[in-house]
Image (cartoon, rainbow, N blue to C red):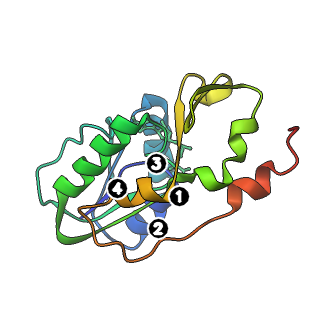
């Protein structure tokens, strides 16, 4: 069983491969939209509204948890809570695949519309993410967040720097 703690493109990949997928997102709108897309595609998954900090599944349930561009949308304490929830619901030997933002390349700190909360946290002040935090991790944060995990692979992805390189400084 796979839990997709988010509602991105991965839902289609895993459901289309025939895995039993549970997906959740805090946004009811995202939940409804995803249900609609799945129906149109003739696929099925168990999609529910839910907070990543309090995952509604028993311990040792999932082989894989996927979370792409979600868990950094939180203050540090909620990221720690989320990762402890992921650990709790994974089976022994289970795999987590997810993304964090890096402070090393924290170009989003330059966004005019952001409120800077502290050295690593901003809160977006416009658009669909209005009021939602973003946490930028140092490498030592990553090792601290995942201290109970065996880290198999850690990859820098430059997508945000590429997209945002032309923003005004
Ligand atoms: C940048 S979007 C990424 C969506 C999707 N994973 C993708 O790759 O297209 C961030 C998602 O995280 C969800 N989210 C933010 N805070 C959350 C929380 N505390 N618990 C669960 N989902 C949350 C938002 O509703 C939004 O759908």
For the residues labelled 3 and 4, the Cα–Cα distance comes to: 26 Å
Give the side of residue 70 with respect to residue 124, left or right.
Answer: left
Any atom of ligand 1 within 8 Å of the CB at mark 1? yes
C-alpha span from label 3 to label 2: 12 Å
Report if the CB atoms under discs 3 and 1 are less than 8 Å apart: no
Q: What mark, if any, has residue 9 been given in the picture?
A: 1
Disc 3 under 8 Å from ligand 1? The reply is yes
Could you tell me how far apart the alpha carbons at marks 1 and 4 are, in whole angstroms?
28 Å
Whether residue 25 can be seen here: no
Tell which of 9 and 112 is nearer to you.
Answer: 112
Mark 2 vs 4, N-terminal side: 2
Check disc 4 and report the residue beneath it: 144
* Above-or-below relation of 161 to 25: below
- Residue 41 is situated, as x and y percent measured from the top left of the image, at 50, 58
Give x and y (percent) for residue 17. 39, 73
Looking at the image, which is closer to me, 133 or 50?
A: 133
In this rendering, is residue 113 above or below 111? above
The image shows residue 81, relative to residue 103, as above or below, that is: above
The nearer-to-camera label among 3 and 4 is: 4
Q: Which residue is located at x 28 percent, y 41 percent?
A: 81
The x, y position of residue 39, in whole percent, is 44, 50
* Earlier residue among tags 1 and 4: 1
Task: Give the residue drawn at x 65%, y 22%.
Answer: 125
């Amino acid at each position: 069983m796979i839990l997709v703690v988010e509602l991105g493109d991965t839902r289609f990949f895993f459901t289309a491969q025939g895995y039993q997928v549970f997906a959740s997102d805090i946004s009811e709108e995202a939940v409804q939209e995803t249900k609609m897309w799945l129906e149109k595609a003739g696929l099925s998954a168990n999609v529910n509204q839910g907070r990543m900090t309090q995952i509604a599944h028993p311990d040792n349930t999932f082989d894989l948890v996927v979370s792409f561009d979600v868990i950094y949308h939180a203050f540090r304490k909620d990221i720690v809570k989320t990762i402890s929830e992921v650990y709790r619901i994974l089976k022994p030997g289970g795999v987590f695949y997810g993304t964090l933002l890096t402070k090393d390349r924290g170009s989003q700190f330059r966004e005019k519309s952001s409120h800077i909360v502290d050295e690593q946290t901003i809160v977006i002040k416009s658009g669909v993410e209005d009021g939602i935090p973003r946490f930028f991790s140092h490498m030592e944060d990553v090792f601290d967040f995942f201290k109970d995990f065996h880290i198999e692979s850690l990859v820098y992805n430059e997508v945000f720097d590429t997209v945002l390189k032309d923003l005004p400084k």
